[in-house]
Image: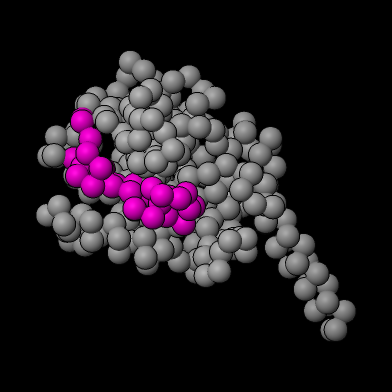
Amino acid sequence: MKTFYLSLLLLFSVCLVKAQECNLEETKNRREQVNSIKKPLNYVVQITMKRGKKYNGTAFFIHPRVLLTAGHNLRKRPQFIFTRVKSITLRVGAINPNNYIIKKKYRTTQNGNIYTRCTFNRKYSIYEDYGIIILPDEELYNQIGGTFKLTLFNSEVLTGRDINLAGYPGDKEFCTLWHDKTSNFFEYVNSKDNPEQLEYLKYDFFTRTGVSGAPVWYSDKGENYVFAIHTYGNNNDDKKCNTATLITTEVYNDIINFCMKKGIDLTK
């Protein structure tokens, strides 16, 4: 019996180690191109931002007038000549450059219709790498009729589930949407410069520039729960897996509070 339990413990340890490793060359070809839009993939938005030059990313609906994305897509950068994002172009339901549901361009104002934390603007932090876009009306939402449900990260809820990611990677044709799912993900604490021992999410999704801001979600009983935002590659710690910023209580409350200031109650 003792030998049985030792073997079981060894097997569990091996599985645990394996689950915390990623072979991104293997998962590179696991991604699937989206050729027809259906829920919830139509909630994912291709975004082109302009500071001095244009660059691309991903965003997603969490409310008829609110999109989330990576903070570094919208961040006011003090070290650049062109410090703030001056405009964004959104392509909703895009599957290629000429095939999308609706396209719209907006001028942007920091802390007006786009938001990133002041501390994040001064110094990058993966724990604060989220950004909010406030739309002036529900015109874009009316074309898709749904949103992801913003939810707190809860590791227990995710046990035994696959998680999803969808975005617009820069190593593929511009404005093509790619989707992937995996069961190989885990919480990770990087002890370097992290006195509060905050966590982020690691996974074996293969990503490239352009996917930043993509939703990380799971589906249950017809609802699509987004609990993290893809924000970083695999070179920020000793785990060679890609990275997402978690929707922690602090992040969740900050999103709720900013939207409330704009007259939008995300809790309803």
Q: What residue is shown at x 26% (from left), y 29% (from top)?
A: 87
Above or below — where is 117 with respect to 7?
Answer: above
Horizontal side of 96 relative to 238 (left or right) equals left
Between 176 and 11, the one nearer to me in the picture: 176
Q: What residue is shown at x 44% (from left), y 38% (from top)?
A: 79
| x then y, percent, for residue 247 | 40, 59
In which quadrant will I find the N terminus?
bottom right
Q: What residue is shown at x 49% (from left), y 52% (from top)?
A: 126
Examine the rendering and report whether any part of residue 97 can be seen. Answer: yes
| x then y, percent, for residue 163 | 49, 51
- Read off the magenta span: 106-135
In which quadrant will I find the C terminus?
bottom left
| x then y, percent, for residue 46 | 35, 31
Between 249 and 224, the one nearer to me in the picture: 249
Which coloring applies here? one colour
Examine the rendering and report whether any part of residue 145 can be seen. Answer: no
Q: Quadrant of residue 42?
A: top left
Q: What residue is shown at x 37% (from left), y 65% (from top)?
A: 250
Q: Residue furthest bottom?
A: 1
Above or below — where is 89 with respect to 198?
Answer: above
Q: Is residue 76 magenta?
A: no
| x then y, percent, for residue 133 | 26, 43
Above or below — where is 205 with respect to 217?
Answer: above
Q: Residue furthest right?
A: 3
Horizontal side of 199 relative to 44 (left or right) equals right
Between 239 and 113, the one nearer to me in the picture: 113
Looking at the rendered structure, the number of numbered marks drawn on it comes to 0
Above or below — where is 160 with respect to 210?
Answer: below
